[in-house]
Amino acid sequence: MSLIIDDSAVKRIEELRTAKKQDDLMLRITVEGGGCSGFQYKFELTDETGDKDLTFGNSVVTDDISMPFIDGSKIIFKQDLIGSDFVIENPNAQSGCGCGTSFAI
């Protein structure tokens, strides 16, 4: 199982580490039931990991239950005039919604 962490995401996580003065800060990605397409991504910053967590590039962490849903995905940080956010390009998703945080498998 793998995740591709884009340089834009690594850079943003490094900026957040510096701003919050927490060298161990990582982006946690969790997949939960719900959203308009069946599943939704939940993003949070954390400096804690558990026994069943998987860490990628010392920047992103997820749990063993969420991983099959995002396996092979690319994590990107996008910034434009409307705002900025972490985005997941998920090859497992058969459909998604306009908000970009909800998907179906």
Image (cartoon, helix red, strand yellow):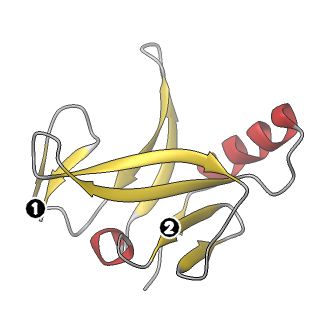
Q: Residue at x 46, y 80 (%)?
A: 2
Tell me the element at label 1.
loop
Tell me the element at label 2.
strand
Q: Residues within 10 Å of mark 2 (few under 14, many from 20)?
A: many
Measured as percent of width and height from the top left, residue 69 is found at: 28, 70
The residue under label 1 is 94
Q: Amino acid at mark 1?
A: Gln
Q: Is residue 1 left or right of residue 36?
A: right
Q: CA distance from mark 2 to mark 1?
A: 21 Å
Q: Amino acid at mark 2?
A: Thr
Q: Quadrant of residue 66?
A: bottom left
Q: Which numbered mark, 2 or 1, is in the foreground of this view?
A: 2
Q: Residue at x 27, y 39 (%)?
A: 100
- Which dot marks residue 62? 2
Figure check: 80 above or below 71: above
Q: Residue at x 80, y 43 (%)?
A: 17
Measured as percent of width and height from the top left, residue 41 is found at: 34, 50
Q: Of residues 84 and 44, which is closer to you in this image?
A: 44
| N-terminal label among 2 and 1 | 2
Figure check: 43 above or below 61: above
Measured as percent of width and height from the top left, residue 38 is found at: 11, 52
Q: Of residues 83 and 17, which is closer to you in this image?
A: 17
